[in-house]
Amino acid sequence: MAQDRTFARPLPASDRVDIIPVSAGQEASTIASSATRVQVSIAPGPLEPALTALSGQTQLRLAYRTTITENLATQGAEGLFAPLEALAKVLEGTGLTYQAAGPSTITLVNPRFVQLPGPAPTPDVALDTITVEGNASAIAAVGGDPGAVGFVATRTSAGTKTSTPLIEVPQSISVITRAQLDTQNVQSVTEALRYVPGVSVESYGYDPKGFDWLFIRGFNAQATSDFRDGLRQLNTSYSFFRTEPYALERIEVLRGPSSTLYGQSDAGGIINRVSKRPLLTPINEVQFQLGNFGRVEGMFDLTGPVNPERTLSARLIGVARSSDTQYRYGNGAEIPDDRLYLAPSFTWAPDAATSLTVLADVLRDRSGGTVTFFTPNARPTKLLIGDPSFNRFAQDQATIGYQFEHHFDDVWSVRQNLRYGHVELGLNNLLLGGLTSTGLSRIARRFDERLDALAVDNQVEARFATGFLRHDLLLGLDYTRSDGDVRRFTGAAPSLDPFAPVYGRFVPTPTTPLLNYREVMNQLGVYAQDQIKVGDSWILTLGGRYDDVTLDTQNRLTATDTKLDTGAFSGRAGLTYLTGFGLAPYVSFAQSFVPNTGVSAPAAGARPFDPSRGEQWEVGVKYIPQGWNALFTAALFDITKTNVLTTDFANPGFQIATGAIRSRGIELEGRIGLTEGWDAVASFTYLDAEVTKDTRAIIGNRPAIVPNYSASAWLNYTVQTGWLRGLSLGGGVRYVGDSFGDAANTLRIKERTLLDAAVSYTTGNWLFSVNATNLADRQYITTCTSLFDCYPGVRRTVIGRVKYVF
């Protein structure tokens, strides 16, 4: 992931300056002697947001190079301090010091890099600095974390693959910060997305398999939106890479077509999961969680430098969980949800211009597989079709990769991100066959799958000026490869009496082959992007990309080999206007593409399908009020997706790529720190999605599982003074409008409103918290794909947590 190197006044290479650090008391005595002691409350964590909070609490102006705070963390500060005493406390262990740059301005410096090449500084040469002042500091915060202060982030690299303020990106983007993830104590990626506009989650209710079922702007995004650290997490059949949310620093949601930068992805957008990185300041924590449904979970997160020179830092994250779920068989047997997870990483940064971060993780999941209820005429019952003696889901996965970055000078830099992953999956499941005189007939299925995946992204970035135009030029070449092996078997299973169900009966291992194939996908993409600033107000963003995709499917049952070779160009153009008071209207056009697998009927030439294409027009506005820690966004969009696969009635049993879907809507989002101790996030979505072209009689219908309206809001307050200081109370409400479970729009799913709550208390290094989702324990149906196939929603979940930070 790109680190921020953008400065207000970039210096030419010949004008680099020396930084000569001074002691804390050498030039800052005027500030220190005149300062009164103030109450300071800075939590341990990444240094960037801590400096932002410190500036707001002490009114100090802080100026520093954008690179020196990367990968640093603070142990915090609590109590009454003079401003410089508080700053010294926050900087303890970071290796940074400071010097006075004016009556109330402090410059941070790193003594490790005092000998930079170039002439001595003169009064006419300005340091490359960012100035932080009061609550408005969120605008300027940069580094490994995207400038997050509480629930508000104002910088990300996801929208451009360069570190860019969110307000300058002509695309609707949401960033879920680590602070929000911790406050809501999210247990999955889909939980984290519940308060994001334009995103529908838990589309098939609670799934013990842990899949991230989600839609973005009306389009199914489960398989095509899955990115981690800017690289796609590839998948095939049931083999998906799982992401442990405790190992994430943030989650970035890009709404709308994003193929220009990321290649094959659907028209709705992508979800980028950003991993925690090693820090140079020791920040360690352990926590223990207990919850309903028998949940017991332990976690740890350890990070810090590993050598005296502080050129190496490491991090180790671990999770161990033993839990049941909200489902239980009639004989009392529980459905497990167990996980073991370990994620080591380290960073080597020999100087300020070079860094290499190696990231790895291993995961072991064990659960009860697919849960299927008997729902006659779409009426929910507690009767489970499966059997605890047979149903199971087991996944083992491992990944390893690295992120390399080097800055040659103030203009040129290069980056390479790479990840390799391996998945092994086993799934046993019992399906409903039908109604018989002896009860419910069942079908046994067995899945054995393997997936190997490789993704690499090479980037060259240049920042330069041509006359009055300032360019941020990005050139990229990426490659992905997936090699999946899928074997699926079917077999007989004993029937189930719905009135007197008997569980624990023997189910023979299914041995009749149903599927047996190997699928190899190779994708090569080349892309270019230029962010052009005209003066101080206009930003023109232009991008283009061409992808070539090959797909080779070897069907072992039929001894046939099907090859697909397709390609597509995806473009993007956006124009943003920056006002002088934090308002930024924009307009943009973007394209997407997703390869369609399979071929047409033999009578139609047995030709590979053209890829599905998406085009979007979007207009919007982003607003960061001056002096506020806040970000407000509004977007109107119009997306058309073509070449959607649909039924070929002229050739029964085959498909044809002639369908089309149009999705238009409005999205509103606000993220704000109201006053000291307050955090809030709110969103609203209106979505008008319809099928505009199809061979079936569904033209004009709403696509399945897509609500017209959704809204959410979360408010959190932490007491700052008095005997209740450290107490935090939070609550949220989520509304999801009605939808349809089928393409024919005959199965209407009712709207629902759900409540969430959180309470925590922090004292010293300890945190105690309780979180509850679906507080009223409302029972609801998320969707029904038929009258006998409905999916219940997530029941009330309560989790208590004890955390110790050291």
Image (tube, rainbow, N blue to C red):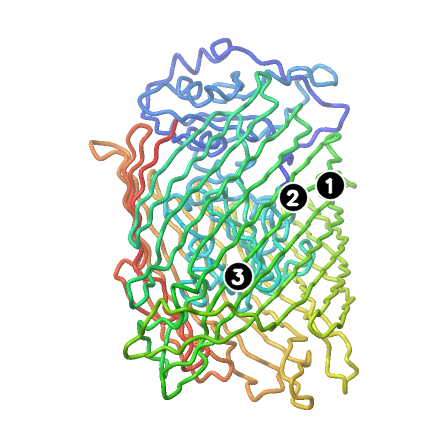
Residue identified by numbered label 2: 162
In this rendering, does residue 423 appear at all? yes
Q: Quadrant location of residue 726? A: top left
Q: CA distance from mark 3 to mark 1?
A: 29 Å
The answer to whether 386 appears left or right of 127 in the picture is: left
The answer to whether 615 appears left or right of 632 in the picture is: right
Residue identified by numbered label 3: 635
**Amino acid type, residue under disc 1 in the picture:** Glu
Q: Are marks 1 and 2 in contact (CB under 8 Å)?
A: yes
Q: Is residue 533 above or below residue 208?
A: above
Residue identified by numbered label 1: 461
Q: Counting residues from the N terminus, which is met first, the one under dot 1 or under dot 2?
A: 2
Q: CA distance from mark 2 to mark 3?
A: 22 Å
Q: Position of residue 576 (x, y in %)?
A: 62, 53
Label 1 Cα neighbours within 10 Å, binned few <14 / some 14-19 / many ≥20: many
**Amino acid type, residue under disc 2 in the picture:** Thr
The answer to whether 502 appears left or right of 684 in the picture is: left
Q: Counting residues from the N terminus, which is met first, the one under dot 3 or under dot 1?
A: 1
